[in-house]
Image (cartoon, rainbow, N blue to C red):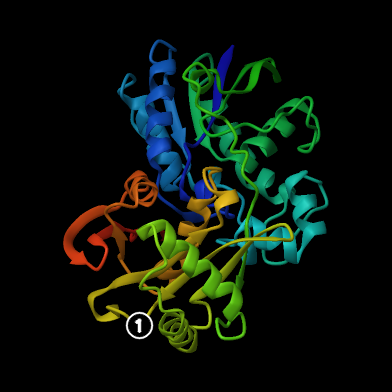
Amino acid sequence: MTKIYLIRHVQAEGNLYRMMQGHWDGEATALGLRQAALLGERMKDTPLDAIYVSDLSRAIHTAEALQQYHPLPLRIDPRLREIDMGPWEGRFFGDLKYEAPGEIKRFLQREDGWKEEGAEGYAEVTARAWPAIEEILRDNEGKSVAVVSHGVTIRCLLAKMLGIGAGDPERLPLGGNTAISCLRYENGVFTPEYIGDCAHLERMNIPVWEQTPDLRGEAIDPMREAEFYVACYEDAWRAAHGTTRGFTPESYLLAAAEHHRADPGAVLRLWAGDEPVGLVDMDTRRSAHANYGWLSLIYLRPEFRRRGMGIQLLGRVIMHYRALGRRSLRLYAAEDNRAAMAFYRHWGFEKLGAEQGSFGTIWLLEKKIGGAGYV
C-alpha cells in the first residue's frame, strides 16, 4: 500500500490580492510563512519517504516546511504546476467577475467544459499532471510521499483518482492554503482518508478562507470625477490630521490630473459590487530613475474599513509598479494617524525617515515589491 499526501501551497501574494495566479510566481505572504510553519509541525511525525513539488515558488516554499522535519531532497516537477490561466493570468477576480461573470462562474465551479482561449482547460491540466502521479506511484510503491501542488491541479488529480467531476462540491470540497488530502493506493484503487483538511490552521484560529468581497478597479480621469476625488482626499486628510484646515483641493486635483495624463492607469476607483469603496492615486513619474514607485493616496470609505479590503487596494498599486519594473514603493504617512501607520506596518512598510509637517511629524515609509513574475 502506498500513501500519498496532496498538499496545496501556502498563501501567496495572488491569494492575498485576490488575483489569478496560474503560472505567475508571486511570493509567500507573512500569513503564508505562518501556515508553512504549522504545516511542518503537523507533518513532523508523519512518515515520508519522498517529497515532490511544483516548480513555482509558493509550492517550493511549502515543501521546504516539510524538510524541517524530513531531510529529504525536493523532487521538483513542472508538471505539477498550477493551471495556466492564459489571458487571465495576473488579473484581479473583481475585474473578471465584472467583465466576464458567466465565464468566471464556470471556472470557479470547475465546469468540465470551461476553456478560456489561450488558457489550459481542466482536461489539459489532468493530462499534464497525471503522468507525474503515475511515475511517483511507480517509483514509491509501498512508501509514503508528499506531493505539493496547487488548488486547481490538486482538484483535477483528485477527480481523476476518485472518478468524480472536478466540480463536485460535496465529494471534492475546495481546499484552502496548505490543505492536505491523504489517499491510500493499493491494487490500482485510491481510497481517501481525508480531503482538503486544514485542521492545523483551524486549531490556531487561522481562517481558511477570506470573507472579503473581490473589489473591481476602474481607471478614472480625476478631473471628470472631481467631486468623488476631492471627497475622498478631503476625508483622508481629515483622518490623517484631525481637521480639514490646510486642505487645498485644487492643488491635489491638479496633481492627480498630471498623474493621469502621464499614466492613464494611475488613478483608480475601487468598487464592491455597485458601491464605490475607495481610491488610489499613483505618481508613476516620481523617482522612476531611482526605481521606486510613489503612492500619493490610498483611501477607503469609513464604512468599508477594518473589513480586510485595504490590502486589495495596496495590491493594485504593487502590481502596477511591478509591471513598470519598480523594486519598492514609497509614501508619506502622518505619525499621529494610528490606523494608517498600523496598516502600513502590518503590510511590511519600513521607516526610511521623518520630517516635520504642518500638523506634526510625517514618516517616509517604504515597502520592497520586486521579485515576482513568471517562470
Q: Is residue 291 above or below residue 11?
A: below
> Residue 84 versus residue 14: which sits nearer the camera?
14
* Residue 222 position by quadrant: bottom right
Q: Is residue 189 above or below residue 356?
A: above
Q: Position of residue 92 (x, y in %)?
A: 60, 59
The answer to whether residue 102 is left or right of residue 344 is: right
Q: Position of residue 287 (x, y in %)?
A: 27, 78
Give the secondary structure at mark 1. Answer: loop
The answer to whether residue 321 is left or right of residue 280 is: left
Q: Quadrant of the C terminus?
A: bottom left
Identify the residue shown where x is 49% and y is 84%: 260
Q: Position of residue 297 (x, y in %)?
A: 43, 67
Q: Is residue 304 above or below residue 321?
A: above
Residue assigned mark 1: 285
Q: Is residue 101 above or below residue 199?
A: below
Q: Residues within 10 Å of mark 1 (few under 14, many from 20)?
A: some
Identify the residue shown where x is 73% and y is 66%: 117
Q: How many marks?
A: 1
* Residue 273 position by quadrant: bottom right
